[in-house]
């Protein structure tokens, strides 16, 4: 039996019918058509599906719908405000920290979660904090550069 | 149906209702100036280096200057992260004298784009650039002609800047491409080679340009096959056997009744469940019990090498010179070794996907394919339909690396869509992705070599299953023979192209053994190579790498340096790696990698660096971590927790330098660098701790074993 759950997605309240066992990834991508968040492995091993739930970067494929009642979720679609790109997005472009782009939303959201926790993060901490996110095209060094420069930019403001 | 415009916000303009007939296509294109391809001066191998059905060529448009002054560029190539969406736009913009941001790339659409066999083999820049530049130069001449008419003066009195044609000595007299194109309908055949620019006149080629698709990708707007949602679409989950090639014996679908709305689709060995909810579809499929007859297992990851060596009976001499016996007799030092390399998965972050629907008797499909035209053909054949009834559309790919040259999921999705009469999406799970991958093949290379006073005298190179790509001898060896041992159908697992396929394996074997010979001769590996190379370009490339790396500087405790040279897709590569090896644990930490390449003309230096860095980063995975476990055709590896690829913490600083050759032809860029990673790492590990590991990946266990 399906039942309604309510939560905030990218600042907007939403109510959606779920059975409760679905992954949050399915809720976001399939029920709510926000396809920026990607499916990569289904086991929390690659980080392509990373979103922010209540200020914490989490693997949306590993969380079930019943656990998000009343929570606040931010996905890649919710990162830019008033049509302006987030400093992380700008830095990813400036450093061309992507190739195929499939891991990119998860990378950016994981970095966003990292910077929420520790805005003055060191390069070593970035590498450690990002280590469970995988990129097969090999953009790692550029991603670290991008996060470093975005952090600097954000700390200025 | 939702229109494509909504679904492809980045590309736009792919939603024109077109039919397969290209003459009609040209009619439907509307106004503007269209340059179509025609076989003339440009010879076939020049154009694609691939087999093309001639009848498909006559009315293939390359570009259209639209009435708003923007330009559509049509190419059968796809974008999977390798950056041709940017570099192709650049060469077109260069010749047309427009901003690169005025180009709209229409890629891999089987009804809009010129035929293309597939995006692989590092071919795009080498073979798609020339006709595209020619077409753009032709369009520029047409536009100049129109302007000359308008101003009543000859073309040589005019010049173009950023899509605006000026009268040379009167800058107040000008006209834009948009104005010139308005109301026009000019179709130009490319019959002769128009004059293309010389390197000295380049404004764009050779300048770094940030990927044009970067913004779409950082905002989540870039669409991949799994992002398409059609009204009434169902999600298909296929019931899979454990082993490839299994035959269905019995099926028990009685539990399907517990899943309301779930529908069973069966055809031969294909058993699938469809549902409008992907989670229910998956769960229902998990409740269907199929008894399979599995093929008999012939080898596993440990016995595969013996199996290949014993069972491949056929061989062909690939290259030969002098006499092996004479060479051996001449030598003062002899060495031999066998180098092993297991299967390697592509492991793209996006698994194979297909989304499709029937409109009447026509199938419309998006698929994560490196070969839209190949997929069109395969799907048409599988469903017994004419090819023109299958339309494969433009979409981004989340990585490919050769693995998306094969698309069984597209055929399955099409069959299911036909059977159920609804739009269907099929997304491989990570487990399916491993099972149905067409791996870089497991292979071995047997090397025997001799040296006399520091000079190579003889070299026997027997390749089992890795193929001969890139193995033409570039060392100066009087007596050598390279043999290719291969046999169709020898592998129980799927095998195929994997970023410079077997060249990774053979380069690892050759360069490891060059080091073995250097040490046997008591000469350092750099000097030994420089003394034995025959080709001046390769020597220059190695010298550039050595200079950039600072070869000869003092090593830290536990650190080692390793060199590897190779050639792939027309490009010469020299990599020098620095690693640290923990002698207690055998753990390798890459410290630094320098890569020098002679890749001819570099169209987008920035893009070339991205590709080179990416290849090296990916290559560290096969060199150090990637090991596929299997028994027979049953792939035990099923996710990233048991298939380790390179991570952030294992990626060292990477420096890429290219030989300056702006006047030369461009060569391959996507693949070459990766081939040298295995050899450079293995040699650096030996240099660091004295462990010579003959099998990739070079794991801590193998290092400790070698140290015993």
Image: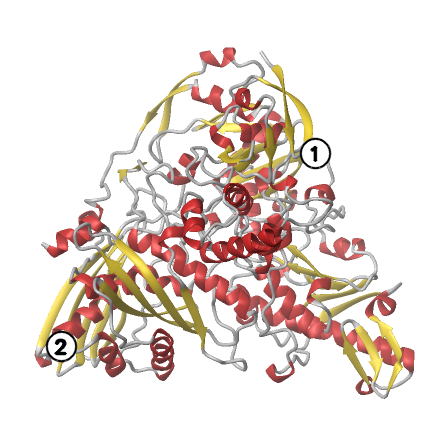
Q: Earlier in the sequence, mark 1 or mark 2?
A: 1
Residue B701 lies, in percent from the top left, at 19, 48
Q: Quadrant of residue B178?
A: bottom right
- Numbered-mark total: 2
As measured in the structure, the alpha-carbon distance from the residue carrying label 1 to the one carrying label 2 is 72 Å
The answer to whether residue B488 is left or right of residue B7 is left
1 or 2: mark nearer the eye = 2
What residue is shown with label 1?
B360
Label at residue B521:
2
> Compared with residue B390, is residue B550 higher up or lower down, i.e. above or below?
below
Give the camera-side residue of B578 and B395: B578
Question: Which chain does the residue under circle 1 lie in?
Answer: B
The chain containing the residue under callout 2 comes to B
Q: Are marks 1 and 2 in contact (CB under 8 Å)?
A: no
Q: Residues within 10 Å of mark 2 (few under 14, many from 20)?
A: many
Residue shown at 56% from the left, 58% from the top: A96
Residues B591 and B422: in front is: B591
Callout 2: helix, strand or loop? helix
């Amino acid at each position: 039996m399906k039942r309604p759950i309510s939560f905030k997605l990218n600042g907007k309240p939403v109510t959606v019918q779920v059975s409760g066992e679905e992954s949050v990834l399915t809720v976001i991508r399939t029920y709510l058509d926000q396809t920026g968040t990607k499916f990569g492995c289904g086991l929390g091993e690659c980080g392509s599906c990373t979103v922010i739930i209540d200020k914490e970067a989490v693997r949306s494929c590993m969380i079930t719908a019943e656990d998000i009642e009343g929570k606040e979720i931010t996905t890649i679609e919710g990162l830019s405000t008033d049509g302006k790109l987030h400093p992380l997005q700008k830095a990813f472009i400036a450093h061309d920290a992507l190739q195929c782009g499939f891991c990119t939303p998860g990378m950016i959201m994981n970095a966003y979660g990292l910077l929420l926790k520790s805005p003055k993060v060191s390069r070593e901490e970035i590498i450690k904090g990002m280590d469970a996110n995988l990129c097969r095209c090999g953009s790692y060094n550029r991603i670290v550069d991008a996060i470093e420069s975005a952090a600097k930019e954000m700390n200025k403001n | 149906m939702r229109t494509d415009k909504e679904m492809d916000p980045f590309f736009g303009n792919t939603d024109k209702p077109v039919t397969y007939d290209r003459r009609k296509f040209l009619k439907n294109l509307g106004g503007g100036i269209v340059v179509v391809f025609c076989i003339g001066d440009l010879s076939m191998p020049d154009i694609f280096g691939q087999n093309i059905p001639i009848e498909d060529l006559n009315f293939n448009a390359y570009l259209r200057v639209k009435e708003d002054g923007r330009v559509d560029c049509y190419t059968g190539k796809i974008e999977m992260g390798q950056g041709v969406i940017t570099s192709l736009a650049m060469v077109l913009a260069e010749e047309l004298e427009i901003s690169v941001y005025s180009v709209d790339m229409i890629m891999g659409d089987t009804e809009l784009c010129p035929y293309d066999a597939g995006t692989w083999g590092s071919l795009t820049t080498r073979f798609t650039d020339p006709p595209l530049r020619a077409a753009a130069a032709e369009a520029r001449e047409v536009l100049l002609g129109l302007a000359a008419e308008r101003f009543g003066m000859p073309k040589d009195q005019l010049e173009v800047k950023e899509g605006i044609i000026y009268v040379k000595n009167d800058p107040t007299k000008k006209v834009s491409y948009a104005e010139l194109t308005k109301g026009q309908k000019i179709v130009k055949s490319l019959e002769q080679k128009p004059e293309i620019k010389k390197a000295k006149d380049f404004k764009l080629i050779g300048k770094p340009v940030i990927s044009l698709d970067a913004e779409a990708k950082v905002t989540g707007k870039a669409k991949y096959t799994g992002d398409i949602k059609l009204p009434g679409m169902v999600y298909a989950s296929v019931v899979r056997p454990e082993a490839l090639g299994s035959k269905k014996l019995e099926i028990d679908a009685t539990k399907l009744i517990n899943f309301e709305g779930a529908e069973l689709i069966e055809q031969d060995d294909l058993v699938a469940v469809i549902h409008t909810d992907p989670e229910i579809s998956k769960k229902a499929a998990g409740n269907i019990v199929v008894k399979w007859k599995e093929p008999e297992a012939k080898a596993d990851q440990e016995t595969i090498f013996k199996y290949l060596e014993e069972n491949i009976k056929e061989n062909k001499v690939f290259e030969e010179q002098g006499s092996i016996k004479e060479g051996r007799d001449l030598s003062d030092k002899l060495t031999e070794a066998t180098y092993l390399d297991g299967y390697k998965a592509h492991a793209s972050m996006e698994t194979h996907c297909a989304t499709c629907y029937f409109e009447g008797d026509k199938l419309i499909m998006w698929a994560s394919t490196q070969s839209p035209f190949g997929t069109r053909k395969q799907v048409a054949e599988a469903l017994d339909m004419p090819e023109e009834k299958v339309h494969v559309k433009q979409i981004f790919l989340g990585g490919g690396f050769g693995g998306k040259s094969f698309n069984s999921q597209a055929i399955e999705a099409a069959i299911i869509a036909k059977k159920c009469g609804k739009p269907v999406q099929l997304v491989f799970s990570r487990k399916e992705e491993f099972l149905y991958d067409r791996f870089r093949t497991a292979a071995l290379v047997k090397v025997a070599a001799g040296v006399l006073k520091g000079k190579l005298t003889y070299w026997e190179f027997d390749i089992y299953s890795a193929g001969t790509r890139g193995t033409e001898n570039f060392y100066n060896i009087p007596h050598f023979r390279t043999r290719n041992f291969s046999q169709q159908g020898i592998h129980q697992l799927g095998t195929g192209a994997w970023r410079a396929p077997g060249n990774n394996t053979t380069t690892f074997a050759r360069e490891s053994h060059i080091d073995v010979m250097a040490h046997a001769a008591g000469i350092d590996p750099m000097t030994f190579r420089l003394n034995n190379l025959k080709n001046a370009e390769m020597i220059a490339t190695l010298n550039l790498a050595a200079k950039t790396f600072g070869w000869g500087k003092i090593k830290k405790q536990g650190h080692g340096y390793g060199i590897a040279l190779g050639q792939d897709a027309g490009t010469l590569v020299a990599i020098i790696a620095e690693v640290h090896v923990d002698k207690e644990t055998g753990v390798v930490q890459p410290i630094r990698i320098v890569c020098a390449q002679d890749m001819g003309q570099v169209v987008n230096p920035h893009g070339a660096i991205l590709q080179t860095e990416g290849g090296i980063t990916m290559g560290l995975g096969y060199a150090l971590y990637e090991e596929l476990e299997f028994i027979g055709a049953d792939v035990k590896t099923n996710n990233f927790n048991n298939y380790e690829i390179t991570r952030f913490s294992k990626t060292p600083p990477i420096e890429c330098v290219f030989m300056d050759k702006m006047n030369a032809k461009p060569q391959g860029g996507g693949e070459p660098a990766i081939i040298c990673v295995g050899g450079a790492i293995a040699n650096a590990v030996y240099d660091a701790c004295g462990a010579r590991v003959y099998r990739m990946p070079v794991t801590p266990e193998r290092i400790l074993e070698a140290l015993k």
